[in-house]
Amino acid sequence: MTNRRIILTPRPSRAIAPAEAVEPTFNFTMALPGHASSRHTKRAYFRWIDQYLVDVAGLKPTVGAARVHRMMALPVRLLQQSLSAAQLRAWLGILVRADHGKQGIQQARAAVVTLSSLLAEAGLLDEYASATIARVRPPKADEGQRPGRWLSPDQIRQLIAASREIATSDPQRLRNHVITGILCTMALRRDELSLVRWGDLSVQNDRPVLRVRGKGRKTAIIDVPRPILSLIDRWHDLLERLDRVDPASPMLRRMHKGGRVGKRGLSPDGIWLVVGDAAEYAGLGHVAPHDLRRSVAGALHEGGVPIDKISKLLRHSNIAVTERYLNRLPKANEGALLMSDLLGLETDWVGEW
């Protein structure tokens, strides 16, 4: 109950009459610290709560600063009407049908459960309702697990080329090439890539390296391949001609209509759009940024790279995590192919029909 004064904020009234009632709002951004382990989780919770209110309450979707503003002033009455175990269970079913992965669905559930719990702590939601929401279980793995893509090296090259071809200007073409080049070699997560600043790039012991901010506020140093460094240098030179590049400024920038380079950094959702649009253009179907991380691991593993080096690149807590990661990749199962060869079946066999 002690948090009520901080997180319960009145929405400014646009009416002149002072007697008009002010609708109470809930400041999710103030209440969340201590309940989200990292800035990545915090951003993800904002995204899922926004999506929940879009799907369940019929609000319009928001992005960027507008989404943060919404999280700072969530209408209490709307939350009370929209938060229930039945509605959460139905919403998770919607996410399953939309092919969201198991991890994403679990995170979506956690975001709603956390919000309802904080509302109950503030006395704004019935504790029984909050408890029943917390008992809603996410769909089973076979229902909620989106089958990840594992691209071949040729498909990765196609996606990188497509990221350039979908651009509408030379700056966007170069920026997209930097995005897919880094994702397809250095195996960064999209959240990590969006946080990269120019000051994170340096030379250590005659090796170009990039400092990456990972999960749980962990940082790591990753060697930058020379071809990727060349791309980054060209992108840096382009930005320098447009505006002075500050070490604290984001490496990746948003693009405006007409090919104008913005000053604000590219969001994780923006990176997702670049990858998704490039994959569709290349005829690869649905490909998520994390699929590229999975594909890097798979290609290195098939190429005979020791698992400890793969684990270090992925920045897993230990090799056992990497082993589980690689075990989820679809393994070759060639029994049917061998049987076809034993029978002497040819590709024109169906021609008999």
Image: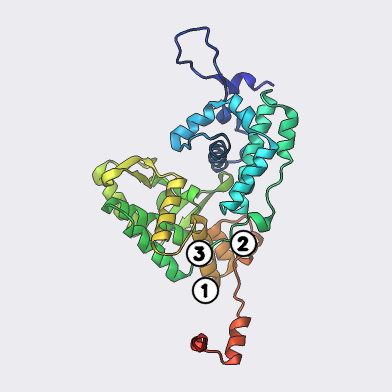
Can residue 227 be seen in the rendering of this structure? no
Q: Nearer the viewer, residue 119 or 266?
A: 119
Q: Residue at x 63, y 82 (%)?
A: 335
Can residue 93 be seen in the rendering of this structure? yes
Question: Residue 117's quadrant in the figure?
Answer: top right
Residue matched to label 1: 303
The location of residue 39, given as percent across then percent down, is 54, 40
In the image, is 52 to the left or to the right of 85? left
The location of residue 219, given as percent across then percent down, is 53, 48
Q: Amino acid at mark 3?
A: Val
Residue matched to label 2: 325
The residue lying furthest to the left in this view is 241
User: Tag 1's secondary structure?
Assistant: loop
Question: Mark 3 or mark 2, which is nearer the start of the sequence?
Answer: 3
Question: In the displayed structure, would residue 184 be above or below residue 271?
Answer: below
Question: In the displayed structure, would residue 350 be above or below residue 247?
Answer: below
The location of residue 5, given as percent across then percent down, is 61, 18
Question: Mark 1 or mark 2, which is nearer the start of the sequence?
Answer: 1
Q: How was the colour assigned to the protein in this rendering?
A: rainbow
Q: Amino acid at mark 2?
A: Tyr
Question: Mark 3 or mark 1, which is nearer the start of the sequence?
Answer: 3
Q: Nearer the viewer, residue 163 or 136?
A: 136
Q: Amino acid at mark 1?
A: Gly
Closer to the eye: label 2 or 1 = 2
Cα–Cα gap, marks 1 and 3: 10 Å
Cα–Cα gap, marks 2 and 1: 16 Å
Question: Residue 86's quadrant in the figure?
Answer: top right
Q: Which mark is residue 296?
A: 3
Residue density around tag 2, few if under 14, some if 14–19, many if 20 or more, within 10 Å: some
User: Tag 2's secondary structure?
Assistant: helix
Q: Residue at x 50, y 64 (%)?
A: 296
